[in-house]
Image (cartoon, rainbow, N blue to C red):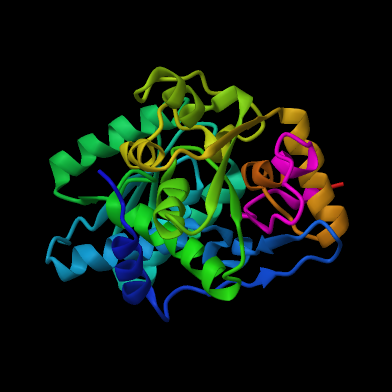
Amino acid sequence: MKVTRQDVQAAANRIAGRVRRTPLLPPSDADAVWIKCEFLQHCGVFKTRGAFNRQLAALEAGEVGSSGIVVASGGNAGLAQAYVARELGITATVFVPEGAPEVKVSRIRGYGADVRHVGLEYADAYRAATEFADQSGAVFAHAYDQLEVAAGAGTIGEEILEDEPSIDTIVLAVGGGGLYAGVAAAAFGRARVVAVEPERCATLHEAMAAGRPVDVEVSGVAADSLGARRVGEAAFAAQAAEPPVSVLVTDDDIIRARTALWNDYRIAAEYGAAAAYAALLSGHYVPEDGERVAVVICGANTDPTTLP
């Protein structure tokens, strides 16, 4: 499954007027780093774009019945799909692992979704969600590895390059890879992508090394949002078409970046969203002289009491 720029442009047309065009904050110093403020999106996460694109496409195709949609999620995808389902008048069932953050689970319920806890990891919730879809006839919405979902996320890349065509590089975090696959499609031939992953759940990095998607161990501070066990087919196809710069960051790097985003910008980023900024702050990715970089801060569904 390969996402194209045409898929992203179709998604942009479909979801226009339903999602926020989030601001691209210009550099405040000599580092020439723009910040894509996607944490300001509905639900506080980029996944709302793909959720709208997936559900609207399913409605257009006449696929949605009385059982509505079902999704497995570590938290954010469920939050976005539940919000969109409420907006479109669709029933939503969300499977989450036992350790899903309560700050996200309570909001999913607040949007009217039926939340079901299964297992310890996203992979456990995923298996339960697919079984539910088979048995009930609910439309399955993947958290990241579905063309409509990834294409919706890719509209972030379109916006960045429309707002600032001189951007050379887009830095973003990777979990299952839907954001990466979509943005890579939007930026293909126009800007490089830096794919940042926590060392303790590096699905894309390990897939690139193995030449195929492989299972990885999942742990660390960002596991609730970047804790997919295996990178998606869409992301793997994207790296085959145009390899990204693959960067790994430590938990300490992520924690320092999250603290810096709060102290310097008052951005209440969740750990997974801070991973992209961590690549720059830690020096694991050093832009060349004159390189114009945009970093995507993709989510803010965090417990504010954990901020410094």
Where residue 219 sits: x, y (%)? 59, 23
Q: Quadrant of the N terminus?
A: top left
Where residue 216 sits: x, y (%)? 47, 20
Q: Above or below — where is 69 with respect to 276?
A: below
First to last magenta residue range: 278-306
Q: Above or below — where is 54 with respect to 271?
A: below
Where residue 55 sits: x, y (%)? 28, 63
Query: Does the magenta segment cover residue 295?
Result: yes
Q: Residue 281 is drawn in which quadrant?
A: top right
Where residue 213 sits: x, y (%)? 36, 25
Q: Is residue 250 left or right of residue 96?
A: right
Q: Residue 7 is drawn in which quadrant?
A: bottom left
Q: In this orientation, does residue 239 appear?
A: yes
Q: Above or below — where is 41 with respect to 233?
A: below
Query: Could you say which is closer to the camera, residue 238 or residue 214?
Result: 238
Question: How many numbered markers are drawn?
Answer: 0
Query: Does the magenta segment cover residue 15?
Result: no
Q: In this orientation, does residue 85 appear?
A: no
Residue visible at 29% across and 69% down in the picture: 10
Residue visible at 33% across and 39% down in the picture: 237
Magenta region's main secondary structure? loop
Residue visible at 13% across and 66% down in the picture: 61
Q: Is residue 207 left or right of residue 142?
A: right
